[in-house]
Image: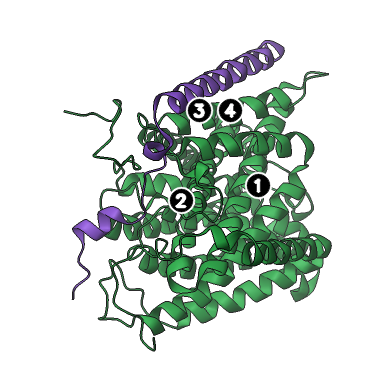
Amino acid sequence: MTTALEPAIHGDRVSLLRVLGPAHVWALGVGIVLVGEFTGWNFSADKGGTLAALIVCWVVGLLYTSVAMIDSEVTSTVAAAGGQYAQAKHIVGPLMAFNVALFLVFAYTMLEVSDAILLGDTIVAKAGVDGLTHNSFIAATIVVLAWLNYRGVLMTLNVNFVITAIAYVSIVILFFSVSPWTQGAVLKLNELVTPGNALPYGWIGVIAAFQFGIWYYLGIEGTTQAAEEVRSPARSLPYGTMAGMITLLIAAAMTWYVCASLMPWEYLGVTPYPLWDAGKLTGSPLLENLLFIATLLAAIASANGCINDAARAWFSLGRDRYLPSWFSAVHPKYRTPYRSILFLLPIALAFAFIADLNQAITFSILSGVLQYTFMSINIMMFRKKWPLGTIRRGYTHPFHPLPAIVLFCLCVVTFFAIFLGFGSQLSAMVAFYFLISVWFHFYRYKFVRRGDQFTMPWPKPQGY
Amino acid sequence: MWVALSYACWGISIILALWMLYDWFKVDTTYSEEVLTSSREGELEAASEEHRI
């Protein structure tokens, strides 16, 4: 009998291993995102005040609930590695698919870079030793996690489940430790958020806050990258994704409530460690150390999930010859896309050593929002080409087309918010995707085996 | 302690990076390119799901 740790070649094929369940899907999605509660979301307070941070928490929560519902329906039907890339390929077309895959690789690689920088900076801040730099901690984070991903997806996501759960529980412990039901004892929300400073820049501040409100949930759509490795994609993916979204909505609300009740918005909006600082402000060394460790674990979980997802997207591009097929190799023993993991490793290291946190985060968010805009269009085309009843869906999202319209509108608002803060980066990124699309259309696409790339055994779409 | 941890991080990173390079070389010289790149999208779905309503 062949086990997962022995070379497993069935006939002439070596494929990814189907070993994951809904808990792993949850660990992948929440693991990537949860770091956003430990840093990132709070910069929205700098843009628009504490109340703006709460407003975007709920409104961006609506955006991501739409993302999760739409993604669950399409992915439970197009269950392939590459996630949104495979969806775009079957529903929109190759050029869109190529762009979506690049959105994915950029979003996850830049998020991984941001996580590693955050981890390094957090350790350096804790150590307080002159001359100690973050480079060694960044290198260890990226290389050790790449090694874990290289060795197999099951162990990778088992580790992610444990460390994500610990980080999440730390937020819950902090929440109940400050007596949230008794304002005035530890929490001072009434004193810190007053009618005079609730929205210091008015409603334009709320719009500007969207850019960082994304951090509450950025990356939950990464669950779809596990599609080819879950035992029952039609059941596990919607279940894990929706459970992850519910988990994150609760975590976001608790995080805002505790941090807004302990810190003035002028400080909350600029600190890189809002939850760690909240732990310090309680006066409990135990909570301070717990939140320090949880910040590190959340960064590790996020980087781990990002390596997993970026490698699958890159692997899928190679498998369809959108990039050289060399990248589509699967390790015969560990059953992972090992060449894609190794190829992206030095790229992540280079960015982590030369880029700053703000730049990396902005590139990640921009690629993410481009991807969400695509998803709103994608689901409209999916429902039009294959209406309900024509193909089997693992999950059917309710109220169509309302979630798609809400998603599209919120993406437009977020683009405007990003333009306010990072207009030049937004323009540069759009120019990059335009040029790479021209290259793909006129040069690369001739290497693609056109008939082989469409693998879903679906009936012809309506209107074709 | 933190400085020692920093050196340990460099050491672990180098060891694991070298191990991955060694394993990559070993795999690529042991198996043919056709076998390593033989994965196909949707194969299991095509076999197990007929997509009939």
Report which residue position mark 2 lands on: A319
Say which amino acid is labelled 1: Met
Do the residues under discs 3 and 4 have CB atoms within 8 angstroms? Answer: yes
Say which amino acid is labelled 2: Arg
Structural distance between the alpha carbons of marks 1 and 4: 15 Å
Structural distance between the alpha carbons of marks 3 and 1: 19 Å
Q: Earlier in the sequence, mark 2 or mark 4?
A: 4
**The chain drawn purple is chain what?**
B
Q: Chain of mark 1?
A: A
Q: Earlier in the sequence, mark 3 or mark 1?
A: 1
Query: Horizontal and vertical percent for residue A373?
Result: 58, 71
Report which residue position mark 3 lands on: A147
Q: Quadrant where the N terminus of chain A lies?
A: top left
Looking at the rendered structure, which numbered label has been put on residue A110? 1
**The chain drawn green is chain what?**
A
Q: Chain of mark 2?
A: A
Q: Nearer the viewer, residue A223 or A178?
A: A223
Q: Chain of mark 4?
A: A
